[in-house]
Structure formats: structure tokens, C-alpha cells
Amino acid sequence: MVAKEKPVEFEKDPDEEPKKGSKKSNPLKGLMTGNMLAKEPFVKQIPYLGFIVLLTVLYIGNRFRTERIVSESEKLRKEVVNLRSESITTAAELMNISRQTEVARMVRDNGIDLEESVKPPRTIKKSIW
């Protein structure tokens, strides 16, 4: 007579998914132990997660760049306002000192020996013939 062999029974891994009738495993525990990260459904999603991380990094970088550009444009706007007011002031001063009476006063004050012309200016015409 030949003895029948008994089937070998393996011990179940405590990290294996529980059967339908037993308690559900804690997802946080699975994440902390790393079992959840090694499962096939999660591994299939890694390229998408990488894409989302890339988009997040690009979004943050774009936001910092935009803030820098807005700050710089505001600084330039203030500089334009200051330069415009300086230009208006300079133009007003130039108009003031270039008046005929002001020029005559400056000539007299500086002691330059010039006289104001009493004759009106004439136009010089050059004819070809």
C-alpha cells in the first residue's frame, strides 16, 4: 500500500489582502508599510502621478516668474512717472530761460557786451536765376 501524501499548506502572509468576510485592512497602514505602493494598480498610475508632479512644479515656477514680472513692471511704471514729471519740469525751465526778456536779463547780469536788435529779422532769399 502506498501512503497518500497530504497537501502542503502555506502560512498566510499577514500583509495579504483580507478575504471578503474578514475585516478590511487599514489603508493608512498599507501606505505606511509600503504594501499599497507595491500593488499593481498603484504602479500603473506612476506615470500619471509623475505628470501631475511635473505640472505642479511648472505651475509654481510660472507663478514665481509672473510675480517677479509684475513687481518689475510696477517698479518701471513708477520710474516712468518720475521721469515724466522730471521731463515736464525740465521743459518748463527751458521755456522760462529761453524767453527773450529772460535772455536779455541773463546777458545783462553776466556783463556780456551785447545789444538787443531793434530791427525785425529779415528772410534771406536765394534765387537760382
Image (cartoon, helix red, strand yellow):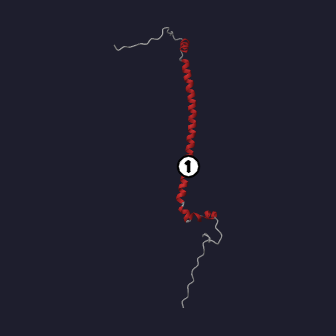
Residue appearing at x 61%, y 65% in the figure = 30
Above or below for 70 versus 80: below
Q: How many residues crowd mark 1 within 10 Å: few (<14), some (14–19), many (20+)?
A: few
Residue 121: image location, x then y, percent: 46, 11
Q: Which kind of residue does numbered mark 1 sit on? A: Tyr
**Label 1 element class:** helix
Above or below for 32 versus 126: below
Residue 84: image location, x then y, percent: 56, 29
**Nearer to me, 110 or 97:** 97
> Among all residues in the image, which is located at the extreme left?
129
Question: In the rendered image, which quarter is residue 72 located in?
Answer: top right
Residue 16: image location, x then y, percent: 60, 70
Left or right of residue 111: residue 128? left
> Among all residues in the image, which is located at the extreme bottom?
1
Residue highlighted by disc 1: 59
**Nearer to me, 107 or 28:** 28
Residue appearing at x 54%, y 65% in the figure = 40
Location of the N terminus (image quadrant): bottom right
Residue appearing at x 55%, y 18% in the figure = 97
Left or right of residue 110: residue 126? left
Residue appearing at x 56%, y 42% in the figure = 68
> Among all residues in the image, which is located at the extreme right?
23
